[in-house]
Amino acid sequence: QVHLVESGGGLVQAGGSLRLSCEASGIIFSINAFSWFRQAPGYHRQWVATITNGEKTNYADSVKGRFTISRDNAKKTVYLQMNSLKPEDTAVYYCNTANMYWGQGTQVTVSS
C-alpha cells in the first residue's frame, strides 16, 4: 500500500522560507516521478512542481525562481524548498505520485 506523508508546513512571514518533505513508502521510489500541488480555500487544487525519476524538474510560473523541488532516493523523500514566500502561497500542500496517490497535506500559511 502506498503512503505519502508530508511535513514541514507552518506559519511564516512574507519573504521567509520553509522546506516541505514528502516521505514515501509502499512504492519503488526511484522509478517514480513526484509532484507537489497546493489548494487554497475556495480554489481548485493547483500543480506546483514535478521532479522526474531522472531529476528533471518543472515549475508553475507562479513559483518559478522561488521554489525548488528535489529528491533523495536513499531516504525515499521528496522536498520542496520554498523561498521568498508570499501571502498568496498560503495553501495546503500535497505530495503526489503516479497521478493517483496523495498525501494528507501540510498547511502553509504566509502572513503579510
Image (cartoon, grey):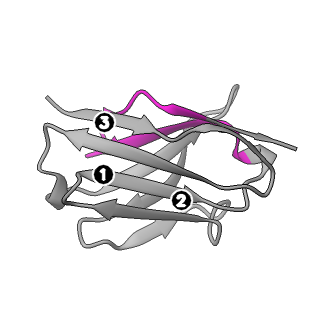
| Label 3 secondary element | strand
Q: Which mark is residue 77?
A: 1
Residue 57 picture location, percent across and down = 41, 70
**Corner quadrant of residue 101:** top left
| Label 1 – label 3 distance at C-alpha | 9 Å
Which range of residues does the magenta coloring cover? Answer: 89-107
Is residue 10 left or right of 97 when viewed as pictured?
right
Q: Name the residue under label 2.
A: 81
Mark 1 Cα within 10 Å, few/some/many (few <14, many 20+)? many
Sort mark 3 into few (<14), some (14-19) or many (20+) by Cα contacts within 10 Å. many
Are the residues tagged 1 and 2 within 8 Å (C-beta)?
A: no
The quadrant where residue 25 appears: top left
Residue type pointed to by label 3: Leu
- Residue at the image position 31 percent from the left and 71 percent from the top: 55
Q: Residues within 10 Å of mark 2 (few under 14, many from 20)?
A: some
Q: Which of 72 and 27 is in front in this view?
A: 72
Separation (CA) of disc 1 from disc 2: 13 Å
Q: Is residue 104 magenta?
A: yes
Residue 104 sits above or below residue 95 on the image: above
Seen at 25% across and 42% down, the residue is 24
| Camera-side mark, 3 or 2 | 2
As measured in the structure, the alpha-carbon distance from the residue carrying label 3 to the one carrying label 2 is: 18 Å
Badge 1 or badge 3: first in the primary sequence: 3
Q: Does the magenta stretch include residue 47?
A: no
Residue occupied by mark 3: 4
* Quarter in which the N terminus is drawn: top left
* Circle 1 SS class: strand
